[in-house]
Amino acid sequence: MPPALLLLLLLMAAVTARADNTTQRCVPGLLLPVWEPQHSLSTGDVLARALVYFLSLIYLFIGVSIVADRFMASIEVITSKEKEVTVKKANGETQIVVVRVWNETVANLTLMALGSSAPEILLSIIEIYAKNFDAGALGPGTIVGSAAFNLFVIIAICVYVIPDGEVRKIKHLRVFFVTATWSIFAYVWLYLILAVITPGVVDVWEALLTLLFFPATVTTAYIADRRMLFYKYMKKDYRVNKRGVIVESEGLELSRPSHGPLGGELKQLDEEQVDEAVREFEENRREYIRILRKLRQLHPSLEMEQLELMAREEVLNRGPKSRAFYRIQATRKLTGGGNLMRRALQAERRASTVDLDDVKMDDSQHAIHVFFDPGHYTVMESVGELALTVRREGGDPNQCVLVDYRTEDGSASAGSDYVAVAGTLFFGPGESVQTIGVSVIDDDLFEEDEHFYVKLSGLRLASRDGAPVGQTNGSAVRRHSVPELRLVAPFVATVMILDDDHGGVFSVAEKDVEIVESVGTYSLRVCRWSGARGRVAVPYVTLEGTAKPGKDYEHCQGEVVFENNETEQYINIPIIEEDSYEKDVLFYVELGEPRFLSADAGAVLDLQRRPAAELTDQQRVALLGRPRLGDAVRAQIRVKESKEFKNTVDKLVQRANASFLVSTSSWKEQFIEAVTVSAGDDDGGDEAKEAGAAGARMPGCADYVLHFITVFWKVLFAFVPPTDVLHGYPCFLVSIVGIGLLTAVIGDLASHFGCTIHLRDGVTAISIVALGTSVPDTFASKVAAVQDRYADASVGNVTGSNGVNVFLGIGVAWTLAAVVHWWRDSAFEVDPGNLAFSVTLYCCEAALAIGLMLLRRHPRVGGELGGPRAIKAASSLFLLLLWLVYVVMSALEAYDCLPLAGAAGGS
């Protein structure tokens, strides 16, 4: 609150005191008594008392802002609840999207409006109770004065702070029209019941109808938002924006294609009435995809986990945020609480870092595990002796164990293909590896590849001299201090014997392959079996399918060369990455006839030219040994979107809920935050960048001063239940009680302050109380105007709040008073006077302000906020002038300086 305002008020008080021969006597408030004595006070005493009242009001406004911070955080958590919705696409596939349970419009007009206007609403209700259900001027005056400040001053600031040349438009234009209409009607209705229908008296039906207009406002806004009732019969235009997202245009005539793929999609959208939340989900997801692509281009060497964290920061910084977030952010900066975005991102980093010291050891780490390492062996028939490795892990390394092994036939037979073995391995103290030797028998016959097995069994404890002390059947045994013994997979090893007397049979290892586009280069494995003799070349070529060379992969053609006794080779195919969210294309790799490259090539070719009848038995055997293709000569490779990329996008979408930025999980966290001094920011445009800096910014002098001024309120309201308790409802209830108590004290102080300097309650309401309750909203709207892509969070919600303030603040208070007076068999009298004049003046100026907002949608300006420097400066000055005229004229009328207006208001 600027000191100049206090001086202005004191000057006004001196002038009015001179003009007024009567002495205004202060009356006790609901909680605060009157400061005695009231008579024979010197000018110094009056100024001292006024200064004490004024500073106390400022300090209480700070307290209200801080407890309202907790209140808005609970509302954000409550309204941010999400659910999963399954949507069926045109091709029959289903997709799960995450949508809010609360409709955004309903949330803004109910809980969000209540949170931002709770002090004004509660002040009106508390004043009625404090005056024994008789009408007061402070509550209604604060509501009307706050509405004027919101509509004129806040919007003027929001118009001007947008960078030159940029604009912000209202996204939900239908909702804006509805709420703007209700906001003006609310004050027209207030004038009608005060000065026209039953002048000076408010009946029960009038007060009750005022209250019922609140659900009517919410319902009509919801109908407009969801295009229900008559909206479903109105023409709707769809278009494709720059990011390829199908959106509906509002208030503009745009052409739409009637043919082609987009025309079909748009027709389907029109017929099926696709849900707004689903379209919003798709738009946000495409935005996250664009952010990830940009980051991967800028930082190609970073891992996906690091890119995800950077994208998370970018999403949090640029993504849409609610009124609660901007309100809390403004309060934190005003009270030395630091940058809300930075604190949230630091918490995000801490959550993403796993502290291994906090990980409890699993019971299985205390068990002794024995297994083959590896579990599969491929050898040539001429290998001779083969050594299989058995490994022991876990448990006490000094504990000795025994394990039995034996060979079993597969397609290979013991005696003709290998030598059967059986025995027991002993693991002594500190030994972790043992080997099993098996001999492979070589012959000169052509054979298919064959295999046999080696199995482990009978794992048991042993003494240091190798004697068994216990035995298991493979299941876990645990008695007191006896360690647990487990044979874990692979406890059966497979040995594949490749015949080396044949050129080999060649085929692809997998006929159907599925890869992700982020693989870079895919290596297709080509296998050689039934022999590995000679140097062989196998030709290959890629064939296009739905995947196109140069777009999805690079065309490849050539040969892979197998050296003598080599059984595997790879074809490397570069895959082109597009960072697609949904991709499913395929192409093929085909093998050609293999051929010898060694000295055997000429002999085999000569034998192939001869008639079969002329070949000797030895030559037939040699011809059978030539390389040939197997059954699997063609691989189908399906390229899909990167699962890592897709999962990262999905996580960003699912975690785009910004409620965690303002939520708290424990009282400990709240108290630590309350006593911690955090660095604020000079501006609100680069939170993520600053939060991502290597070194955290240290608090400055101003941060410490603001913190120590407000630390009492911070610690006091740290006792409010955390927002994570019972979904935020206890925090909601306790916070609103705290706001009510502070508002009651503010009402008493404001009345005593005005009485001290001879200001009437109506003038005090529009000049001090309205400003004090609107300061956090001012800063919140300023930040929202700069950071948000649309003007809804900064401008669109002002009109809704102004109407809700009347319907709830005055509707509830006057309904209670009217019912009580009806019960007492008396009339609830309300002096139209200054209130009727203020309402009339506000309605006229509000119509001008809303008309200006609509004119700014002209293509020359482009939107409600921002625009060319000269135009936005002129708009802001015009709005500020409207507010000054409202305050001055209302103050003059309150002191009967406008006799015609006073007569009109009282008639």
Image (spheres, rainbow, N blue to C red):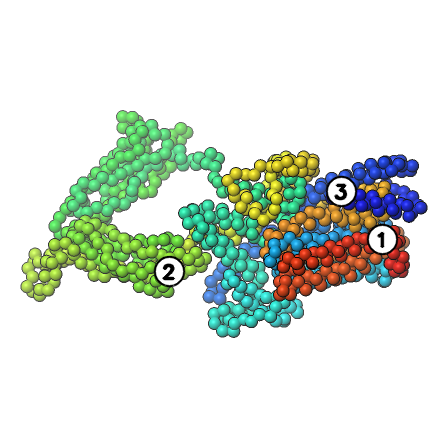
Q: Secondary structure at mark 1?
A: helix
Where residue 56 appears, x then y in whole percent? 77, 39
Cα gap from disc 1 to disc 2, whole angstroms? 75 Å
- Tell me the residue at 38%/37% (across/down): 476
Choose top left, top right, bottom left or bottom right for residue 84. Answer: bottom right
> Mark 2 near mark 3, Cβ–Cβ under 8 Å?
no
Q: Secondary structure at mark 3?
A: helix
**Drawn side of residue 897 relative to residue 874, left or right:** right
> Please, what is the three-letter code of the amino acid marked with disc 3?
Pro
Q: Earlier in the sequence, mark 2 or mark 3?
A: 3
**Camera-nearest residue between 765 and 620:** 765
Residue named by callout 2: 552
Where residue 802 appears, x then y in whole percent? 73, 55
Q: Could one spot residue 818 in this view of the protein?
A: no
* Disc on res. 3: 3
- Tell me the residue at 36%/34% (across/down): 394
**Camera-nearest residue between 456 and 449:** 449
Reply above or below: 376 against 585: above
Cα gap from disc 2 to disc 3, whole angstroms? 68 Å
Residue named by callout 1: 892
Residue furthest out toward the bottom: 258
Reply above or below: 301 against 231: above
Q: Could one spot residue 429 in this view of the protein?
A: yes
Residue furthest out toward the front: 870
> Mark 3 near mark 1, Cβ–Cβ under 8 Å?
no
> Crowding near pointer 2: few (<14 within 10 Å), some, many (20+)?
many
* Disc on res. 29: none
Residue furthest out toward the top: 465
**Camera-nearest residue between 51 and 544:** 51
